[in-house]
Amino acid sequence: MEIIVNTNKIIAALVKDSYSRKIILHSKFNLMTLDFSIKEIEKYKGFIIKKAKIKEEVFYRIFQLLLSKISIVQDKEVKA
């Protein structure tokens, strides 16, 4: 089964070791998100780091770990 993960859930998983993070990291489903979501997370990286009270290196480690479990789909590949 394929499940789309929206930007808010990825941000929630970055900010706190929450259910969102646990679900993403331990899901047996094929998780997907749009490349737009990745761009949005990069855009708000500073806010996320401040909210999570973490260093930039930690942000990137967690982000890469989450992305290792999520396939990124190009926006143009999605049909309305």
Image: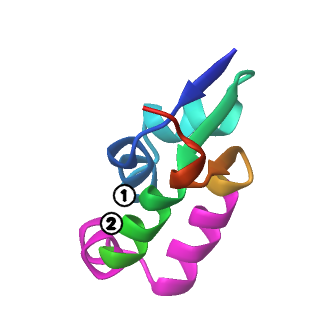
56 or 72: which is nearer to us? 72
Q: Position of residue 39 (x, y in %)?
A: 44, 70
User: Residue at (40%, 40%) from the top-left corner?
Assistant: 6
Q: Residue furthest top?
A: 1
At label 1, which amino acid type do we have? Val
32 left or right, relative to 53: right
Neighbourhood count class around disc 1 (C-alpha, 10 Å): few under 14, some 14–19, many 20 upward: many
To which quarter of the image does residue 20 belong?
top left
Which comes before the other along the chain, label 2 or label 1?
1
Check if mark 2's residue and mark 1's residue have beta carbons within 8 Å.
Answer: yes
User: Residue at (66%, 65%) from the top-left corner?
Assistant: 64
76 or 1: which is nearer to us? 76
- Location of residue 21 with respect to 27 vertically, above or below: below
- Location of residue 65 with respect to 28 vertically, above or below: below
Give the main secondary structure of the magenta stretch: helix
Count up the numbered dots.
2
Q: Is residue 53 magenta?
A: yes
6 left or right, relative to 48: right
User: Residue at (45%, 31%) from the top-left corner?
Assistant: 19
Q: Position of residue 29 (x, y in %)?
A: 71, 22
SS category of the residue bearing label 1: helix
User: Residue at (39%, 66%) from the top-left corner?
Assistant: 41
Separation of residues labelled 2 and 1 (CA atoms): 4 Å
Neighbourhood count class around disc 2 (C-alpha, 10 Å): few under 14, some 14–19, many 20 upward: some
SS category of the residue bearing label 2: helix
At label 2, which amino acid type do we have? Ala
To which quarter of the image does residue 63 belong?
bottom right
Identify the residue under disc 1.
Answer: 15
The stretch of residues the image draws in magenta is: 45-65
Identify the residue under disc 2.
Answer: 52
Q: Position of residue 61 (x, y in %)?
A: 64, 71
Q: Position of residue 5 (x, y in %)?
A: 49, 36
